[in-house]
Image (cartoon, coloured by chain):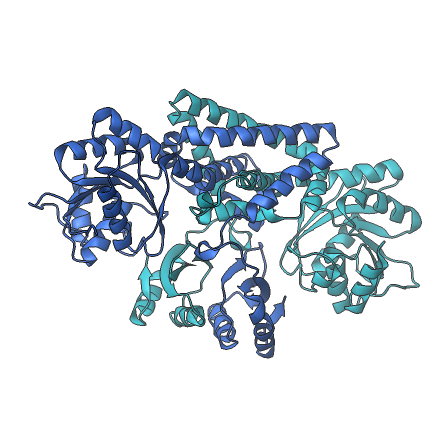
Chain colours: A cyan, B blue
Amino acid sequence: MTELRGPVRIVGTGLIGTSIGLALTRLGVVVELVDANPDYALMAERIGAGSRLVQIEPQLVVVAVPPDHVGEVVAEQLERTDAIVTDAASVKSKPLTDASRLTKDLSRYVGSHPMAGSERSGPLAARADLFDGATWAITPHETSSADAVALVRRLAEACGARTVELPVEDHDLAVARVSHLPQLMSSLAAGTLVDAPSSHLQLSGQGVRDVTRIAAGDPGLWTQIVSANSSALTGLLEQIRDELDRVLVALGKGESGDELTAVLARGVSGAVRVPGKHGTPHIDLVSVLVTIPDRPGQLARLFADAAESGANVEDLRIDHSPGRPAGEVELDVKPGSVDQLVEVLTERGWVVHR
Amino acid sequence: MTELRGPVRIVGTGLIGTSIGLALTRLGVVVELVDANPDYALMAERIGAGSRLVQIEPQLVVVAVPPDHVGEVVAEQLERTDAIVTDAASVKSKPLTDASRLTKDLSRYVGSHPMAGSERSGPLAARADLFDGATWAITPHETSSADAVALVRRLAEACGARTVELPVEDHDLAVARVSHLPQLMSSLAAGTLVDAPSSHLQLSGQGVRDVTRIAAGDPGLWTQIVSANSSALTGLLEQIRDELDRVLVALGKGESGDELTAVLARGVSGAVRVPGKHGTPHIDLVSVLVTIPDRPGQLARLFADAAESGANVEDLRIDHSPGRPAGEVELDVKPGSVDQLVEVLTERGWVVHR
């Protein structure tokens, strides 16, 4: 079995690179930190992610530079070292193609994609446990050696992640669907709010907040990600445009019923396929609504009471309706826990609705 | 000052109509319940929303039937009674136009839109406090009498709602932007997941979950809502289609940078305009991340500790990353509360990240 002995050279000490450094250092693996920006490497070193000067040749190189530069740095590291090389970019075809233009032998390279992140960026946002339990996609290409794949798997496991192995093209199509397309749809929906009078925005509810939340992401980074995955994304966007045209035609005819219902029903079928917590398919959870005064300590009291009922709160939402003097919390629990939960909460004076 | 004395006749005893009945009955107002489906009216009566037989002529009629029938029932009630008439439909132009075709004098009619709901429907999902603190739009048209507007305002206030008065056309454009367009974008995004292999869906994160959540809504109801607001919605959808075409052209050229960044940046500008909790603009809240074991009682312990620090948790999210053995809770608090919160939680053994 291939062992991760180190040293591991990390090129690019932003959020992802530095977090990998912290996770490996925690396990006693020697980590070398390299960044085009010397301040970044220094910061990463100061918080304990590794060392800027390591004299021993690396066993593994992790390339965690911005998406546009990944292929080039991968090729460079393959040429300069005898190490296994991986990267952490969120798109996998483009780095592979870029690297293959610059160097011949890619057998020591395996792409990977640790699927964790944060709205923050940079080394100071890094955390040793960023990848604990997260999904880490590993995408071997045709000439990747078995050793290389095994070592990258060890890396992901050392960081506490759950690995999913899939071909490069599948990976890119998957993230186009579950990440890049939702990002663009969110941005497009949010974009229509720019010109809205403030009085119109007063009518906003939780739906528009949910749909537009990720639109607040960094446009520069997302431009790189989306551009790098343009081929996988283009087909999906064309599909959306065709559906949109059907909706527009249906609305124009004034007899939009069936067409529109078909589009909406297809949305329902898609929505229920999105896995819930812990990667499991949607399980039937029951929502219990509880009214709470908007002041400190009420959530604490509520959760203490909920815990005493023995129910495990699987998920929860706080209702944000503008102007409510009292908030509302929706607790999702397994069906078997509901009766007991409602009984205990009601006993203790909470206003509860199922 | 116009007083709401009753009786109030409610036509349509679904979730909204029955909830209004419960709220008014709670205040001692006599409520008459009418529904084309006698079982619905009976259920509404049984849970205390009013009575199916009231001998006195109504002061106010609230039409809460499905969107497609609102105009017709409004006209009918105007002809049959001397009462002020309002409705509760989520689109306001179409009921007005429909009613104006069927009856001449619309001075006793004022449209309104209580902006509260639930994924559940029917009289049994009704609650007396459904509208507590919610927004209730009131949309007078040109010939609405001042008395009618005042009485509908009393109705909304009696139900505990915050009223917003705006013209019919403004209302419909506003909900097209903040409700109907996000709904369609969510449905379209979710629709692309129907054909996705399950292995691809394994890579789903919180983003796609948020964007597709509302796509699970009832296609039949949403078809009626969206169709009734087609004129306001068409312009916005055309705007989206044009942006989408720009994105597709940019991606096709392979030099998508600037165009794409413009679309994404516009999304950021729109996203930050969506009001947060309590209808206030986004205030700067600071997020504190806390790792919690996924078992009963941990949230209770966390919130108890948070409350003792004196911090009011303004919002929170639970991280759903597939497969994490420990969950993560993100607490949003005001900047002034952060230091104390982090100190107290850390002292008590929580793993906290800012």
The residue drawn where x is 13% and y is 38% is B82
In the current view of this chain or complex, which residue is farthest to the left?
A: B55
A325 or B184, nearer to the observer = A325
In the figure, A104 relative to A257: above or below? Answer: below
The quarter of the displayed image where residue B96 is located: top left
Residue B202 visible, this orientation: no
Which image quarter: residue A125? bottom right
User: Relative to B144, is B237 on the left or the right?
Assistant: right
Residue B220 vs residue B79, the one in the foreground: B79
Q: Where does residue A171 sit, x and y in percent of width and height?
A: 67, 41
Q: Position of residue B330 (x, y in %)?
A: 56, 62
Place of residue A296 in the rendered image (x, y in percent of width and height, measured from the top left): 45, 71
* Rendered view: A337 above or below B86: below
Position of residue A354 measured from the top left corner of the image (x, y, whole percent): 33, 57
Which is nearer the eye, B66 or A164?
B66
Is residue A352 shown above or below B122? below
Q: Does residue A250 appear left or right of residue A37 in this picture?
A: left
Residue B117 left/right relative to A41 = left
Q: Is residue B273 left or right of residue B25?
A: right
Q: Nearer the viewer, residue B84 or A242?
A: B84
Q: Where does the N terminus of chain A fall, quadrant-wise?
A: bottom right
Q: Quadrant of residue B147?
A: top left
* Residue B8 appears in the figure: yes
Q: Count every numbered label the image shows and give the total.
A: 0
Residue lying furthest bottom: B347
